[in-house]
Image: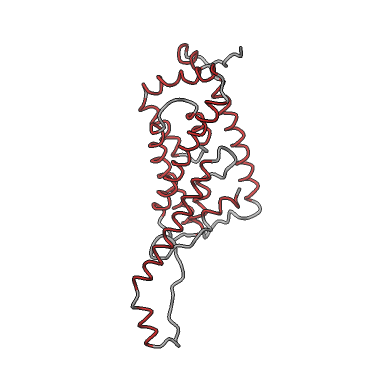
Amino acid sequence: MLAAARVAASGSRLPKRSIWPCPRIALTSSTTSRDAARSTAPSSRAGVCVMAADMLAVATLFAVVFALNVVPAFAPPTWLALSWVGFGHPAANPLLIALIGAAAATAGRVVLARLARVVIRKRILSDRSRDNVDALRNTLLAHRRVTFGIFLFYAFSPFPSNWLFIAYGLTPLPLKLVAVPFFIGRWVSYSFFVFTAARVSHRFDFETPEAQPYLGLYFVLTQLLLLAAVYAFTRIDWQYLIAHKRLRWLTRR
C-alpha cells in the first residue's frame, strides 16, 4: 500500500519557481562570455522547460489520484498519497496540490459511481433490490441540503469514500448532488494533510518498518468493513425504514 501511495510523490520533479523544487543550474568557471550570453539570452526557452515540467508533474499527480479513486476497493487512500507528496516536496504549494488532488478524486469517484450504476445496478441487482434502493430517491431529493451536508461532513474526514459513491451510484440520483460537496470537503481536508505532512516531514519517518504493519492492517480492515457496508446498503429495507422509522433487512423471496 505504501509503495503505491509513493507514486504520486515520486513522479516528475517540478521546478522550484513553481510548485516543486529542482536544483538550480549554475554556470561553471570555465564558461566563456560568449557561452554565458547564449545561456542567459534564451530565457523564454528556460520558461518553456519549466512550464513543461510543471504540466507533466501536474498531469502525473492528477492521473495517479484519479486512478486511486476509480478502483472500487483495496486502493491506497488519497490523503496518504498526497501526504507523501508533502513529505517529498515540503516547499510545494499545499493548496495547489490539494486542489489537483480534490479535482482528480472527485472525477474518479464520479466515474466509480457511474460504473456501479452500469455494472452493479443494471446487471447484478435484482428488480426487487433496485426498487428497494429507488425508495431513497424521493427522500434524498426532498432533503437536498441534508444530503449536501452529509457528503460535505464526510469529505472533511480521512475515511474512505469508495463505498459511499458505490452505494450512491446504485440509486438513480444525479451525481452532481454529491460531487460538489465532496470536492469542497476533500480540498479542505487534503490541504490540511499536505500542509501538515510538509511541516512534520523532518521529524517523523513513516517509512520505518514499525509503522508499515499498522497502516497495512488499518487499510485492509477498513476496506473489508466498507465492502460489508455496501452489501448492507443493498439489504436494508428502505421502504420500510422510511415509512416506519424502523430498521429491518429486506426479505428474500
Q: Residue 205, position in %: x, y? A: 58, 56
Quadrant hosting residue 56: bottom left
Res 223 → quadrant: top right
**Residue visible at 52% across and 36% down in the picture:** 162
Left or right of residue 212, residue 185 in this image? left
Residue 38 placement (x, y as % from top left): 37, 81
Q: Position of residue 126 (x, y in %)?
A: 56, 20
Q: Position of residue 177 (x, y in %)?
A: 38, 31
Vertically, is 39 above or below 3?
below
Q: Residue at x 51, y 34 (%)?
A: 115
Q: Is residue 76 above or below residue 90?
A: above
The C terminus sits in image quarter: top right
Q: Nearer the viewer, residue 16 or 200?
A: 16
Colouring rule applied to residues: secondary structure
How many circles with numbers are drawn on the protein? Answer: 0
Q: Is 120 drawn above or below residue 194 in the view shown?
A: above
Tell me: residue 56, above or below residue 120: below
The one of 212 and 35 positioned closer to us in this rendering: 35
